[in-house]
Image (cartoon, rainbow, N blue to C red):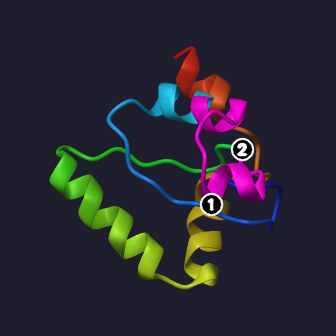
Amino acid sequence: MASRRNGTLYAGVTSNLAQRVWQHREGVVEGFTQQYGCKLLVWFEFADTMDAAIAREKQIKNGSRAKKMALIEAMNPQWHDLYEQIAHG
């Protein structure tokens, strides 16, 4: 999630991406994303298991901002909001 292009970034893990992104977009989740206005889904990745997803989340969170930016730009160079893509297939 991002606040805007090159803005504040947030990485998280969920078993229901569309629902969780909607919650962040609508501001119903208190915490970091609400405080910093992270409402744009600019990158996502699926994992086979929750354990694998959690391990990947930790790897991403421990990585540098440059590495996070590279992940986003490789998948989504224009920083489009990808919510509609995952919400409606």
**Circle 1 sits on which residue?**
72
Earlier in the chain: of badge 1 and badge 2, it is: 2
Up the image or down, 79 lies above or below 23; here it is: below
| Region rendered in magenta | 23-38
Foreground of the two, 26 or 65:
26
Q: Residue 73 appears at what percent x and percent y?
A: 67, 62
CB under 8 Å between callouts 1 and 2? Answer: no
The three-letter code of the residue at mark 1 reads Ile
Q: Residue 50 appears at what percent x and percent y?
A: 20, 47
The three-letter code of the residue at mark 2 reads Leu
Q: Alpha carbon of mark 1 to alpha carbon of mark 2: how far?
A: 12 Å
**Circle 2 sits on which residue?**
40
Q: Answer left or right for 24 relative to 81.
A: left
Is residue 39 among the parts visible in the rendering?
yes
Packing grade of label 1 (10 A; few <14, some 14-19, many >=20) is some
Q: Residue 54 appears at what percent x and percent y?
A: 27, 59
Up the image or down, 74 lies above or below 28; here it is: below
Up the image or down, 29 lies above or below 78; here it is: above
- Based on the picture, tell me whether residue 68 belongs to the magenta stretch: no
Is residue 77 among the parts visible in the rendering?
no
